[in-house]
Image: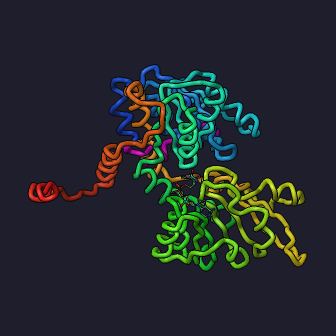
Amino acid sequence: MKSKIGLGKEEYLWAKNRMPILTNLVRKYSKNRILGDFNLGMCLHITKETAVLVMGLAEVGARISLCAANPLSSKENVSEFLRYHNSNVDIFVNRQDDIDSFYNNMDKVLDTNPQIVTDDGAELHKKAVYRDQSFVGGTEETTSGVNRLRRLSNEGLLSYPVIAVNESLMKQLLDNGHGTGQSTLEGIINTTGIIVASKRIVVCGYGWVGKGVARCARGLGAKVTITEVEPLKAMEAFFDGYEVDELEKLLSINDIFITCTGQINIIGREHFSKLKDGAILCNAGHFDVEIDVRYLDRIYPRHYEPKPNVTCYTVNDALGKSKRIYVMTKGRVVNLIGAEGNSPEVMDISFSNQFLAIVYLSKMSSKLANRVYKPPRKLDNKLARLALSRYKIRIDKLSQEQKDYFKK
Ligand SMILES: NC(=O)c1ccc[n+]([C@@H]2O[C@H](COP(=O)([O-])OP(=O)(O)OC[C@H]3O[C@@H](n4cnc5c(N)ncnc54)[C@H](O)[C@@H]3O)[C@@H](O)[C@H]2O)c1
């Protein structure tokens, strides 16, 4: 039988072979060890794609301390492979970690005095602020993390520059949109085994993630309805051909609810008893706050797991009739816990962005202010060109006449 380390290595190689943009960047920068002796602190979902990023950063000279961005999303084979295969990587994650050790692991990463921190959700950044710890710079991978960092920056609490990698258009289109759309549906299907075609699905939030999830669900034959709070987003969803309605009206007639908002209590205590018997609830947003699972656990302590990653609660409606509702992956990111997260092709773009942002900070941070920066559009264009050439796609160029016409 293969060891966990061996299986982790196979997964790493599987991903690496599908991440040529990042691999080529690593090859280019490893010649002069561009991050030679740089100490990086990282808090990411520990997946095979993250292993490709971390091993790549070690190859260009960095020393890395890594912890998990979610208590349930780490892939054990991958973490074992990283633990034993690179002396430049310290990994602070263990299978038996509970919520306290999950947060303690972040402290362990910060105790290594990293110069640059890379986070997914801004927990590490928040802890650093609490510890009054500063860095050369930081990067942030996801929407909820960037929103938090902007709040810290507005309160004058950010003591280093941060590149909001999430705000690269390539990242939003491919990772939040296509990647999370597909992997969320994978998470639901893997975990429940249900057929999506014919199901009535509500997608809460029509931002980057919601749009991708809705598109994939519709592509698989579901009848999709969107809920929104922003009029423009709601109009966009309507003209994209979806039903749009208030959540309250949808509770009793839909089979599956997928939250994608980054907000709190989207499906909360006032909703559970109005759901249809057998309704499935899951979350694709970063934090486990979109479905009020804490309330369910407290009020219905006799819940049970009919399948791994599915919790059944029996709730009573207003007439005292009992019904079962199923919450997937304890309300945490369904695509990373119920499935493998975003595909390597997608993470090739996201992590190439991270890689370039870290290299940029290692050289330029002294010229930056202590605030959150959007990645420059130039970087998006560069990555788009690299991606087009990876897929052997050629595009036209403006003629001189067309360039001049734009100038008039
Ligand atoms: N699971 C993953 O792999 C993954 C990947 C990328 C992003 N994320 C996370 O997904 C979440 C959404 O990210 P995004 O990039 O789509 O953000 P976004 O800001 O583009 O979209 C969020 C949308 O939710 C809407 N919304 C807010 N409150 C709402 C409410 N009460 N009801 C209905 N809609 C509401 C907003 O108007 C907005 O359109 C964030 O938490 C982000 O960090 C997860």
User: Residue at 62% across / 28% down in the picture?
Assistant: 109
Which residue is situated farthest in the top direction here? 37
In the rendered image, the vertical position of residue 276 relative to residue 13, given as above or below: below
How far from the left and from the top, in percent, is residue 5?
A: 61, 36
Residue 270, by quadrant, is bottom right
Query: Would residue 9 be visible to someone looking at this image?
Result: no
Q: Magenta span has 46?
A: no
Figure check: 86 above or below 247 = above
> Quick one: quadrant of the N terminus?
top right
Which residue sits at x=35%, y=30%? 29
Q: Is residue 117 visible?
A: yes
Residue pictured at 69% horizontal, 51% vertical = 288
In x, y percent, where is residue 200? 63, 76
In front of the other: 38 or 275:
275
| Residue 103, x across and y down, in percent | 70, 35
Residue 16 counted in the magenta span: yes
Q: Where is residue 297 in the image (x, y as percent from the top left)?
A: 83, 55
Q: Residue at x 48, y 53 (%)?
A: 175
Scheme by which the image is coloured: rainbow
Q: In which quarter of the image is the C terminus?
A: bottom left
Residue extent of the magenta highlight = 4-21
Looking at the magenta stretch, what is its main secondary structure? helix
Q: Which quadrant does ligand 1 occupy?
A: bottom right
Q: How many marks?
A: 0
Residue that sits furthest to the front in the current view: 155
Judged left or right of residue 367, residue 284 is right
